[in-house]
């Protein structure tokens, strides 16, 4: 879906709006961003559906527009300390570069879809060699062992992926904070006062430790444990208070995708 | 001279076909009467001759088939014998594995498992002597069932297919595979 | 105009082939040098176009293949009773794009670019045969590096990855990047 907007000075795809503004063909000053939002919401209401990818695209583009416009409207950065300011901009540069790169790969993905569709319009010849022709078969199975046949069978019979809603943006780690909370609720009441370090010595990956830490914070929020840290970087002491909290169901969030185990691969 | 619309559609169908295609089916697909089909086929056959194509269109087993020019048979033999490739493609190996583990099995069943048309690959495997027909299934259409051959066992250094590594524990339960198969099995009439 | 001897032999071989045939194998079978093969292939491709054949000869995954005319796809679909091959999700396509343009590339590198965990998508693409491990990176953990496969090229109808749309065309224009950058950076005198 293409996000389109309609305002007194501009009508068309939002994408193109961003392009026009950044190439000075349109003065951002003249565009009431409120109207853009209104138009988008009206458009969404009229179609009656929520397209998540369109929505996120809209958010990204609008965020850039707001950013650009606020820079046009606000006075210069004289009062801000330069160092601090530059730091912010460097981070922004990285973000910008990443945004541009993502868009390029997104565009590549679209191009691939078009290519694949075009290629699918042709069926390759597959009849093979005429039966009348004598084939003195070279051993096609040379170097193939029974194990490879088994692997091929498993590959062939693996459940075929069914087209589903794209959940790639959701981390599907098996280890959730909720599970860690459950684990701690089972361990802590009998443990008295324990240090976080002691609780996590048996864990091997950073991710597992992080999940336990989030679980401890969750329990603290629920008032079921108290936390105490003697000094900076000191050991975190955890004590079970036993107060019934709001239940373990609140901590069902998974760990954020940015700390997926893959990050530690290399 | 360029082909007429009907002749080129027939040529396209024959390019995609693995078995001879009956004129009746062609008439149905093109939505034209039988005599127009015959006419278009004539045109196609003549055009292949006149332009000295590398293939011929022949009437065989009540249908039409595209096959290589008989006078070029020596090249095709060399091609076949040097091997399309010296190893089986992964598609061919997967098909062979399905036959090995589920024999006797029909083409439709293999296609259901692999999710793609397997006619060409089955033909290749049969031609190379790794699989062979082993009876027909009961039920509509009585499709040919395939099994692996002694040559297959020999090449893998096995005494019998029972010696293939077991797969049961690695698989999603047989019910699931069966169910998938049933769901994908073409309705009677295929 | 009738086909030359070399062109018709190549056409015959492609009629019998089930996979793209490399020009090198053609040169070997015909016992002619590579440039004569290229010439004969050109002639064959042109002749199919000029005579509006029902098939086309294309260069794909490093070889030549005979396949049905794309504009006759509706007839082929009716004939083969096939649906459109299952579509890839946009997440899968984007990941595939990253592998295609940055190969060889590790999962962690893909994940860093996409900003999400890509294990599932990478597994799916590997299972479908569009990408495959192509060595390991130096450095800690020695992660597996992935590259695209011939199956990927065939699925996209490409001869080689060099035919992919150039990255420059996909990136927002340099003026735009520059502008956006200037705008976001605090100007000295602003």
Image (cartoon, coloured by chain):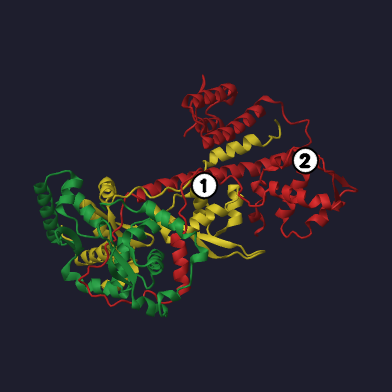
Chain colours: A red, B green, C yellow
> Which residue is at a point 63% across and 51% down the rendered structure image?
A173
Instruction: Respond whether the residues carrying marks 1 and 2 are from the same subunit.
Output: no
Residue A72: x and y in percent read 65, 27
Left or right: residue A177 versus residue C172 is right
Answer yes or no: is residue C153 visible: yes
Chain ID for label 2?
A
> Which residue was labeled with disc 1?
C91
Q: Nearer the viewer, residue C169 or A259?
A: A259
- The residue shown at (42%, 79%) is B158
Q: Secondary structure at mark 1?
A: helix
Q: Which mark is residue C141?
A: none
Frontmost of labels 1 and 2 is 1
In the displayed image of the protein, which residue is found farthest to the right?
Answer: A230
State the residue in front, C36 or A111: A111
Q: Please, what secondary structure does the residue beneath circle 2 have? A: helix
- The residue located at (30%, 54%) in the rendering is A123
User: In the rendered picture of this protein, how many numbered marks are placed on residues?
Assistant: 2
Q: Residues within 10 Å of mark 2 (few under 14, many from 20)?
A: few
Residue C103, given in percent of the width and then of the height, sits at 52, 58
Q: Are marks 1 and 2 in contact (CB under 8 Å)?
A: no
Q: Position of residue B43 (x, y in %)?
A: 11, 53
Q: Is residue A68 above or below residue C51?
A: above
Residue B113 in the figure: left or right of residue A90: left
Chain ID of residue with mark 1: C
Horizontal and vertical percent for residue A119?
A: 36, 51
List the residue tagged with mark 2: A83
Whether residue C33 is visible to the viewer of this picture, yes or no, is no
**Residue depicted at x 78% and y 56%:** A200
Closer to the camera, C63 or B119? B119
* Few, some or many residues within 10 Å of mark 1 (<14, 14–19, 20+): some
In the picture provided, is B167 more to the left or to the right than C15?
Answer: right
């Amino acid at each position: 879906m293409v996000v389109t907007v309609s305002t007194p000075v501009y009508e068309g795809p939002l994408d193109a709006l961003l392009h026009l503004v950044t190439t000075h063909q349109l003065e951002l000053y003249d565009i009431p961003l409120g109207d853009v939002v209104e138009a988008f919401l009206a458009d969404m209401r009229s179609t009656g559906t929520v397209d998540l990818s369109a929505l996120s695209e809209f958010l990204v583009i609008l965020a850039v527009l707001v950013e650009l416009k606020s820079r046009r409207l606000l006075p210069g950065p004289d009062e801000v300390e330069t160092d601090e300011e530059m730091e912010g901009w460097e981070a922004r540069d990285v973000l910008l570069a990443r945004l541009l790169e993502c868009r390029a790969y997104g565009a590549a993905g679209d191009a691939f879809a078009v290519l694949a569709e075009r290629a699918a319009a042709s069926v390759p010849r597959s009849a093979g060699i005429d039966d009348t022709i004598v084939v003195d078969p070279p051993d096609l199975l040379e170097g193939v062992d029974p194990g490879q046949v088994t692997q091929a069978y498993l590959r062939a019979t693996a459940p075929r992926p069914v087209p589903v809603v794209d959940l790639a943006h959701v981390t599907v780690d098996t280890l959730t904070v909720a599970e860690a909370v459950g684990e701690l609720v089972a361990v802590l009441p009998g443990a008295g006062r324990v240090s976080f370090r002691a609780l996590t010595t048996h864990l091997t990956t950073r991710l597992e430790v992080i999940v336990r830490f989030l679980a401890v914070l969750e329990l603290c929020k629920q008032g079921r444990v108290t936390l105490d840290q003697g000094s900076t970087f000191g050991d975190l002491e955890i004590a079970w208070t036993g107060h019934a909290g709001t239940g373990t169901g609140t901590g069902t969030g998974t760990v954020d995708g940015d700390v997926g185990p893959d990050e530690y691969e290399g | 001279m360029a082909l007429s619309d009907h002749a080129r559609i027939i040529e396209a169908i024959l390019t995609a076909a693995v078995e001879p295609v009956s004129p009746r089916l062609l008439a149905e697909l093109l939505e034209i009467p039988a005599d127009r089909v015959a006419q278009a086929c004539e045109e196609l056959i003549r055009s292949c001759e006149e332009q000295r194509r590398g293939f011929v269109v022949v009437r065989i087993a009540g249908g039409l088939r595209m096959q290589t020019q008989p006078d070029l048979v020596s090249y095709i033999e060399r091609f076949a014998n040097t091997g399309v490739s010296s190893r089986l493609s992964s598609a061919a190996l997967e098909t062979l594995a399905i036959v090995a583990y589920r024999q006797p099995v029909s083409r439709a069943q293999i296609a259901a498992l692999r999710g793609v048309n397997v006619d060409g690959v089955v033909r290749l495997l049969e031609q190379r002597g790794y699989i062979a027909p082993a009876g027909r299934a009961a039920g509509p259409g009585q499709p040919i069932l395939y099994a692996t051959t002694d040559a297959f066992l020999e090449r893998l250094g096995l005494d019998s297919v029972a010696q293939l590594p077991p797969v049961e524990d690695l698989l999603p339960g047989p019910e699931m595979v069966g169910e998938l198969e049933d769901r994908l099995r073409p309705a009677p009439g295929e």
